[in-house]
Amino acid sequence: MKTDSPHVLVVDDDAGLRGLLQRYLGGNGLQVRCAADAVEMDRMLAGAHPDLIVLDLMLPGEDGLSIARRLRGATRIPIIMLSARGEELDRIVGLEVGADDYLPKPFNPRELLARIRAVLRRNGPAGESAGPSRPGVFHFGEFRFDPGSRQLTRSQERIALTSGELGLLEAFVQHPNRVLTRDMLVDLIKGFDRSPFDRSIDVRVTRLRRKLERDPANPAFIRTVWGKGYMFTPQGEPLAR
């Protein structure tokens, strides 16, 4: 295995599943470490940060949602959340706390591998080059967004975004003043090569608005076009009441 291959940390209390994923993901070009709970995960994170975390929702001690909230406050490491319940509410809450994707149990390891690769393509694993065709820089309101370096700043202050939020923002800034349906947004988001579960785009829009809008309830940049989708207006014009 190449030493520069992506590093994945699997956090799950099921020893059998940890062993299966370590063998399968490791055999498909990933470096894999495993932790059984939040305490063990924190010990591993103190030594080195992975490129992605696969995080079970139902853990002994601190549960996955609490861990995801805590990680989002301190890091931009992508998170794929797992849950044996598979309920839509769990999926929505997982996204709202900052997970980049969600996979219900039981699942095929091949599907998890595809999800990991898709999230890493959106986020860019450590050491990956942006390539020679670096996209232009976009300015709107007080914001500066550079898709090449995947950085959003406001008045020189960097704003932390998840890989899903970065992909969504890139789709918006590249198609300004145009109504984009949810299906169109799924097609435009780099690496999002599957049909999302219901409301996944809406949840990502809500999270992105919280970071861009002065009044998320009356958005100036990402406007809802009822019955159709969303429109990004870089001039920052809220909808008339």
Image (spheres, helix red, strand yellow):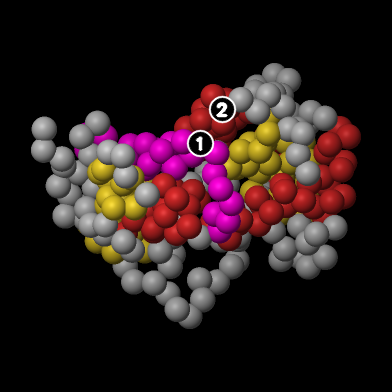
**Does the rendering let one see residue 86?**
yes
Q: Which mark is residue 198?
A: 1
Seen at 51% across and 30% down, the residue is: 92
Q: Quadrant of residue 134?
A: bottom left
Type of the residue with mark 2: Glu
Q: Is residue 222 above or below residue 38?
A: below
Residue 79 percent location from the top left of the image: 60, 42
Type of the residue with mark 1: Asp
The answer to whether mark 1 and mark 2 are in CB contact below 8 A is yes
Q: Is residue 162 above or below residue 167?
A: above
Crowding near pointer 2: few (<14 within 10 Å), some, many (20+)? Answer: few
**Does the rendering let one see residue 69?**
no
Seen at 63% across and 42% down, the residue is: 80
Earlier-in-chain disc, 1 versus 2: 2
Q: Is residue 89 above or below residue 213?
A: above
Which residue in the structure is indicated by mark 2? 88
Residue 152 covered by magenta stretch: no
